[in-house]
Image: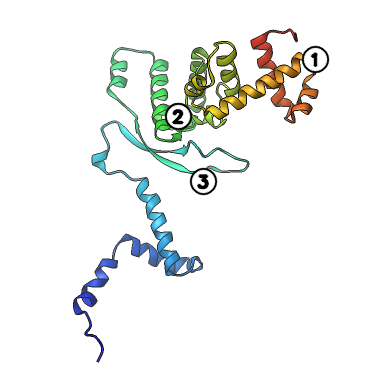
């Protein structure tokens, strides 16, 4: 005779398989049979739930004035014909309104100053959590226009010779002070080291050295009397890139080729 069946397991075991994940597995099996067998379906369901729960926060984990938003992962650079839907999203908890914002209204601070302070706070908080916000993200969050956000932050970057960590500056999406100009300025006008520049511009040390190395190569070609076209040929890069560095060399070293 065979082993006696475990009546309790038979009666209650199926209850352990109830729940959201099982419902999702059944849905995938029914509507997307091309995904494969049960092992692949369970893996797919688990991955979907991982993404879903990463974008949720319990109410007790959120404070007054905070908002849950998603930004583009800092390490996920834009590419040719790469839509936002194909980029890695990072869920963020941002301080949309803090006591300082209310106090600034009471103190009659200009709206432009209040907008700048809130933009800087949101951009830095997103960067600390491993993501970047765009000007459009900020416009929606702050009830402004993306062109206003762009002008406000670009003016701040020019006045302070610093970068605001956002997609316009770190992903080259939109308007902002260029990496090349600021990095080269900090080295040749302010005399800062590569590691100092990396910290102040939110760049890796390797990226800073790459920009500075290209600047030095273009500057040397210019001192040798080569024109922009010849320099581009010798360095194996685009003419527009050489002209951009060329203007930096003229700004930082003067108009003489000597």
Question: Residue shown at 35%/49% (left/top)?
Answer: 53
Q: Quadrant of residue 143?
A: top left
Q: Is residue 31 above or below residue 249?
A: below
For the residue labelled by badge 1, is the local secondary structure a helix, a strand or a loop? loop
Judged by depth in the image, the label closer to the viewer, 3 or 2, is 3
For the residue labelled by badge 3, is the local secondary structure a helix, a strand or a loop? helix
Residue 215, percent from left and from top: 66, 20
Residue bearing mark 2: 139
Q: Report the Cα–Cα distance between label 3 and label 1.
A: 47 Å
The answer to whether the residues at label 1 and label 2 have Cβ atoms under 8 Å apart is no
Residue 34, percent from left and from top: 51, 67
Question: Residue shown at 41%/21% (left/top)?
Answer: 115
Horizontally, is 211 left or right of 138 in the view?
Answer: right
User: 226 or 48, which is in the foreground?
Assistant: 226
Horizontally, is 168 left or right of 102 in the view?
Answer: right
User: 205 or 177, which is in the foreground?
Assistant: 205
Quadrant (top left, top right, bottom left, bottom right) of the C terminus: top right
The label on residue 9 is: none
């Amino acid at each position: 005779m065979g082993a006696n069946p475990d009546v309790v397991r038979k009666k209650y075991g199926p209850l352990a398989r109830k729940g959201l994940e099982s419902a999702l597995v059944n849905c995938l099996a029914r509507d997307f049979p091309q995904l494969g067998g049960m092992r692949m379906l369970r893996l797919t369901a688990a991955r979907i739930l991982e993404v879903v729960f990463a974008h949720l926060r319990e109410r007790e984990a959120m404070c007054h004035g905070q908002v849950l938003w998603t930004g583009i992962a800092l390490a996920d650079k834009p590419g040719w014909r790469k839509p936002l839907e194909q980029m890695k999203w990072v869920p963020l908890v941002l301080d949309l309104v803090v006591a300082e914002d209310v106090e600034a209204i009471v103190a009659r601070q200009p709206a432009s100053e209040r907008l700048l302070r809130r933009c800087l706070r949101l951009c830095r908080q997103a960067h600390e959590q491993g993501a970047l916000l765009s000007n459009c993200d900020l416009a929606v969050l702050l009830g402004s226009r993306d062109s206003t956000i762009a002008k406000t932050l670009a003016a701040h970057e020019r006045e302070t010779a610093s970068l605001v960590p956002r997609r316009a500056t770190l992903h080259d999406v939109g308007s902002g002070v260029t990496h090349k100009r600021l990095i080269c300025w900090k080295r040749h006008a302010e005399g800062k080291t590569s590691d100092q520049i990396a910290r102040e511009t939110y760049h890796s040390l390797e990226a800073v050295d790459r920009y500075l190395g290209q600047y030095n190569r273009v500057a040397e070609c210019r001192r040798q009397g080569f024109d922009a076209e010849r320099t581009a040929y010798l360095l194996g890069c685009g003419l527009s890139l050489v002209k951009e560095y060329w203007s930096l060399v003229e700004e930082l070293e003067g108009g003489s080729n000597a």
